[in-house]
Amino acid sequence: MFDFLESDWFNIGLEILFLILISYDIKKYFQTKKKEYIVNIVLTVGFAIWVLYPYYKSYFGWQESQKSEMISSCQDTNDTKLCKCVDEAIFKEFTHKEYKTLDKNASEFKEFIKETKEECLDESWF
């Protein structure tokens, strides 16, 4: 039901919202010089960091060499589109360190891969 929370567009929308809120408070601060707008700016920046940290952690937790190593191991399969989709889901869900220590035979990881493949094969708009 809340799958949209994990989408990139939701995160981009949040970034735009935070930028609008911060720019509005900066504008109001320069107009009125009231200190409450500085508090609003600090709180908005803090909340933005708290909300968006997992998003950035997932994208910056992998170096390009680590990504290419994982992708090259996946190229052996016939369906490269599915393979790339699963790789992207893994890059978003785990950091490289977490992925290396992860038990690939665990039922939780197998369930994650199964759900990811179903989502990747789903051709719906949503």
Image (cartoon, rainbow, N blue to C red):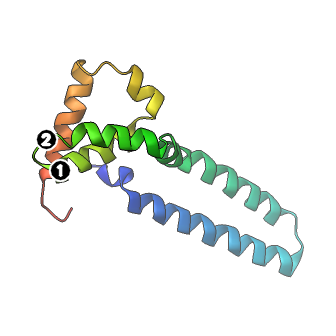
Residue at the spot 88% in from the left edge and 69% down from the top edge: 34
Asked if disc 1 and disc 2 are in contact, CB closer than 8 Å, the reply is yes
Left or right side of 42 for 79: left
Label 1 CA crowd tier, 10 Å (few <14, some 14–19, many 20+): few
Q: Which one is in front, 57 or 7?
A: 57
Secondary element type, mark 1: helix
Q: Which one is in front, 38 or 10?
A: 10
Residue at the spot 52% in from the left edge and 48% down from the top edge: 56
**Residue 126 — which label?**
none
Left or right side of 98 for 88: left
Residue 119 at what x, y percent from top left? Answer: 18, 48
Residue 11 at what x, y percent from top left? Answer: 46, 58
**In the rendered image, which quarter is residue 114 located in?**
top left
Instruction: Kindly identify the amino acid type of the residue bearing the numbered disc 1.
Output: Thr
Q: Is residue 14 above or below residue 83?
A: below
Left or right side of 2 for 39: right
The residue wearing badge 1 is 80
**Residue 77 — which label?**
2
Q: CA distance from mark 1 to mark 2?
A: 7 Å
Residue 108 at what x, y percent from top left? Answer: 26, 24
Secondary element type, mark 2: loop
**In the rendered image, which quarter is residue 117 located in?**
top left
Instruction: Kindly identify the amino acid type of the residue bearing the numbered disc 2.
Output: Thr
Residue at the spot 49% in from the left edge and 42% down from the top edge: 63
Q: Which one is in front, 105 or 8?
A: 105
Label 2 CA crowd tier, 10 Å (few <14, some 14–19, many 20+): few
